[in-house]
Image (tube, coloured by chain):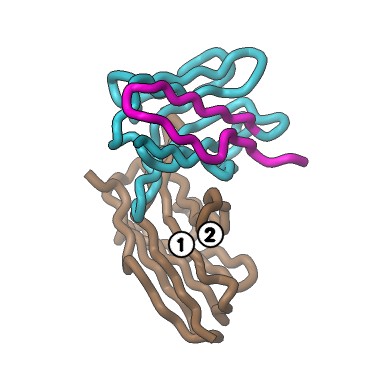
Amino acid sequence: NAGVMQNPRHLVRRRGQEARLRCSPMKGHSHVYWYRQLPEEGLKFMVYLQKENIIDESGMPKERFSAEFPKEGPSILRIQQVVRGDSAAYFCASSKQGQDTQYFGPGTRLTVL
Amino acid sequence: QQQVKQSPQSLIVQKGGISIINCAYENTAFDYFPWYQQFPGKGPALLIAIRPDVSEKKEGRFTISFNKSAKQFSLHIMDSQPGDSATYFCAARWQTGANNLFFGTGTRLTVIP
C-alpha cells in the first residue's frame, strides 16, 4: 500500500519562474492538505482540498499561490513568480473521509535562487 | 500568533532515560491532539494521538498525558533509544470546520548512548 507520494522531491527555480508541486494521496483518501515548513520551524497549514473543491485556503498567501485537486490525477500546488522567501519544504498530507489521521508525504524541497 | 506552544526546543537524554516534551494551547475548540515524529529529510509520521475526553493514552514506549483544565498535553518517551533521535511536533485540530492541523514549533530530541 503506497503512501502519500510527492514529486519532485527537490526543485530549484530562479526568481520569477513558476513552481509546480504534485501530490498523490494514499489510495482511498479523498482529502488533501498542503503545509509549508521553513527551516527550524513547525509546519504551517496552507490549504485543504477535496476532489474538485477547495475547502479551506485560509493559510494560502493571497497572491501567486494556487492549489487544485482535480477529479483525475494528483493535487497540484502552484507558485507563480517565485521569490527567495518561497524556499521551504512543502508537505502534502491525505486522509480518509471521516478519519482524523493525516498521513504525510516525503515533501518537496523548493530552493529559489 | 502561535496556536500551539511547544517546549523545550531541544532535548538531550541518555539512553534508557525518559524524554518529556510539553505543549500548551489556548483555543478550547481544539478536539484532537496528535504527535508527529520527523527524521531529517523525511515527512512527519504520526506517532500517537489523543482526544480531550481521555487523560492518558499509551502505545508501547510512548504516552500522551492530557490536562484539559490546564490546556496542556505532553509526550513521554520511556526507555529512550538512540533511534528515537528525531524532531517531535505536537499539533491540534479544531472540532468544527476544516481539518487542518496547527503545529507546535518542534523539539529536537537527541538520545546519547
Q: Position of residue B64 (x, y in %)?
A: 49, 64
Kind of residue at disc 1: Thr
Horizontally, is A47 left or right of B39 in the view? left
Residue A2 in sight from this viewpoint: yes
How crowded pointer 1 is (Cα within 10 Å; few <14, some 14-19, many 20+) is rated as many
Identified by mark 2, the residue type is Phe
Q: Chain of mark 2?
A: B
Q: Are marks 2 and 1 in contact (CB under 8 Å)?
A: yes
Locate the C terminus of chain B and report the quarter of the image it occupies. bottom right
Locate residue A89, reporting x and y percent: 44, 42
Where residue A60 appears, as percent x and y from the top left, is: 34, 26
Identify the residue shown where x is 43% and y is 56%.
B89
Judging depth in this view, the residue of A11 and A64 nearest the camera is A11
Identify the image quadrant of the N terminus of chain B.
top left
Chain B shade: brown
Magenta-colored span: A1-25
Please name the residue shown 41% across and 19% down the image: A66
> Against B94, is A58 above or below?
above
Instruction: Please tell me if label 2 and label 1 are on a single chain.
Output: yes
Of all chains in the rendering, the one displayed in cyan is A
Residue at image mark 1: B87
